[in-house]
Image (cartoon, rainbow, N blue to C red):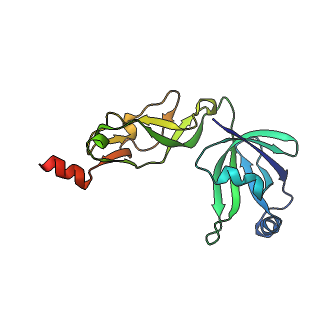
Amino acid sequence: MKTFQLEGAKREGTGKKAAKTYRKSALIPCVLYGGEEVVHFTVKQEGIRKLIYTPEVFIVNLTIEGKAYTAILKDSQYQPVTDTLLHADFQQIFADKPVIIEIPVVLEGLAEGVKAGGKLSLETRKLKVKGLYKNFPEKLAINTEHLGLGKTIQVGELQFDNLELLNAKDSVVAAIKMTRAARGTANS
């Protein structure tokens, strides 16, 4: 899994007034939890931009005033109109404790249903998994070669080494949908 370097500085004040002051200075208020103590800190807006606005998932090597932490981005809040980042939550992770994270799904292979005129549709872009962070892949690759017209791949059918899938077993990950052309060849 990819890593991301992020520098932070401890926050003196917490609350709405302090957060507004930080945001005016192009600093994003953040919090790190999951370790021995909760750490309130700020990061530069430019520094966190490439971590936030990407579909990829990163392990964050966080340095706050000289102290190093390993974390994942757990949540982020945005301004509803301008869509600017207001706040970010990080969870500290450890090599021996399992963690829950969402990993992007990638479909591989040319499905039988696509050859017959159907359309392959990715229904679930990310899957929630639980495991040790060293076992996390960058993407969950799913082979669709065996998928026929009108068929689906559900979470219950999937299995990945050292990872536990937490999505509902019957939720659809990928499907081959019938197109007009495929219906026309099936009826004749």
Residue 52 in the image: x percent, y percent?
66, 53
Q: Residue furthest bottom?
A: 81
Residue 51 in the image: x percent, y percent?
68, 49
Depth check, front residue: 83 or 166: 83
Q: Residue at x 87, y 46 (%)?
A: 65
Residue 138 in the image: x percent, y percent?
58, 37
Q: Image check: 76 left or right of 28?
A: left
Q: Residue at x 49, y 42 (%)?
A: 105
Q: Residue furthest top?
A: 161
Q: Image check: 83 left or right of 170?
A: right
In the picture shown, does residue 24 fall above or below 136?
below
What is the quadrant of residue 131 in the picture? Answer: top right
Q: Residue at x 29, y 47 (%)?
A: 118
In the picture shown, does residue 41 fall above or below 169?
below
Q: Residue at x 69, y 62 (%)?
A: 85
What is the quadrant of residue 170 in the picture? Answer: top left
Depth check, front residue: 24 or 145: 145
In the picture shown, does residue 62 fall above or below 83?
above
Depth check, front residue: 45 or 78: 45
